[in-house]
Amino acid sequence: MKKGQLKAKTPLKQRASLKSHQSLKASVKPKSKVLTVAKLKKDADKYYSKATRYRFADKRGDTWYAQCITCQVEKPIKQLQCGHFMSRRHNILRYRDENTAAQCYGCNVMSQGRQYEFAMAIDDLYGAGTAKALHQESKQLHVFTIEELQEIIKDAKEQVRFYEGQ
């Protein structure tokens, strides 16, 4: 071996023919969908968010419009998010209607949810003291079960179908 040449540490692998590669692909079984709490939470968030935005919306023509709960700007629901008064990390309130509302990106993300304005709006909508009660309830721990999340997804999908059917 000449100076400067590199020696292969492992022998080069033979390339499998196209036919053998296709037969290997056909013999591999697809993974079965394993339901986990994390995957179901992601689905539940998706459908619950859509249902929440519809809940605060009015249909004009073919488009649904809703008002941001904190700054009152009106936008199509596709441009809004599902804002939470108490963060989604508080599982006990994550899918509670009193804790969620349509909120614009500016308020929900850029202004960290504008929690004070959100609290005042909640008290206006659901009665004085609601925000305080939600704050107290947020201190309780809650662990979701697969069945519970499946029920939340089912209910949210039904709500979305109801609104989209109008």
Image (spheres, rainbow, N blue to C red):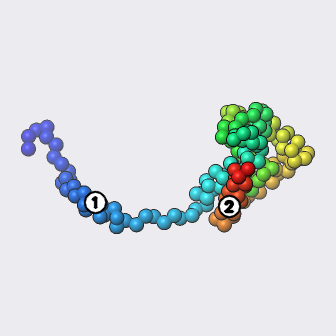
* Viewer-side residue, 95 vs 9: 95
Label annotation for residue 135: none
* Viewer-side residue, 82 vs 137: 82
Look at the numbered disc 2 and give the secondary structure of its residue.
helix
CA gap between label 2 and label 1 equals 41 Å
Residue neighbourhood size for the residue with mark 1, other residues' Cα within 10 Å, grouped as few (<14), some (14–19), many (≥20): few
Look at the numbered disc 1 and give the secondary structure of its residue.
helix
User: Residue 113: horizontal and vertical position, in percent?
Assistant: 73, 38
The residue shown at (68%, 56%) is 157
User: Residue 122: horizontal and vertical position, in percent?
Assistant: 84, 44
User: Residue 114: horizontal and vertical position, in percent?
Assistant: 76, 36
| Residue 16 visible at all | no
Inspect the image, locate mark 1, and give the three-letter code of the amino acid beneath it. Answer: His
Label annotation for residue 21: 1
Inspect the image, locate mark 2, and give the three-letter code of the amino acid beneath it. Answer: Lys
Q: According to the image, label 2 marks what residue?
A: 154
Q: Is 69 situated left or right of 164 in this image?
A: right
**Which quadrant holds residue 17?**
bottom left
* Viewer-side residue, 166 vs 119: 166
**Which quadrant holds residue 158?**
bottom right
